[in-house]
Amino acid sequence: MQVFMGRGIFKNWKQPIYVNFDQLITPEILSEAISILYENSYNMVACVSDCGGGNVGLWKKLDTGFILSDGCMINATPLKELLKVTNTEISVCHRLSQKHLECVKAERQNVGLAAQLLSHSVATALIYYKPGKNTLQTFQKGVLISIKSTQLCMA
């Protein structure tokens, strides 16, 4: 069973937005879910999943980002640009480092790195500095999509 959950970052809400059985999630399915949220004024700011084999394969395919129906690109570019701008002795994102964007092996499971990357200070810095051309300029209706692979046990 595959489930996408939309979740508010600044408001306390959670809603299933996709449920299917025996279906591998493809980049097209995920992109369509994100586009539907975007068209309804919900700006997706992050996408997380468990480390099931199908999900790992999906993330490898999506390494370059998403293109929404209006041509807007969602990728790591704003975070990379923010890191360049704020990589000074005194920084509003003092915990943000290259390690947050280029996790390898066991670092991919480091919840602390993910929490720092998706923190209020990084979101505020993105709003203030607005790095890159295709930047997400509002986080007021921020949505976090969670993808879980669930095995159903039939007795």
Image (spheres, grey):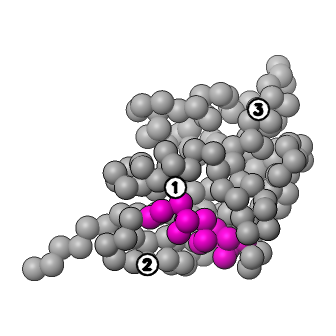
What distance separates the C-alpha of mark 2 from that of mark 3?
Answer: 36 Å
69 and 116: which one is in front? Answer: 69
Q: On the image, numbered disc 1 is attached to which residue?
A: 48
Looking at the rendered structure, the kind of residue marked 1 is Val
Q: On the image, numbered disc 3 is attached to which residue?
A: 83
Residue 119 visible in the picture:
no
Residue 39 visible in the picture:
yes
Q: Which residues are magenta?
A: 25-38
Examine the structure image and report whether residue 22 is included in the region drawn in magenta.
no
Q: Earlier in the sequence, mark 1 or mark 3?
A: 1
Q: On the image, numbered disc 2 is attached to which residue?
A: 19
Element under disc 1: strand
Element under disc 3: helix
What distance separates the C-alpha of mark 2 from that of mark 1?
Answer: 16 Å
Q: Position of residue 44 (x, y in %)?
A: 68, 63
Looking at the rendered structure, the kind of residue marked 2 is Val
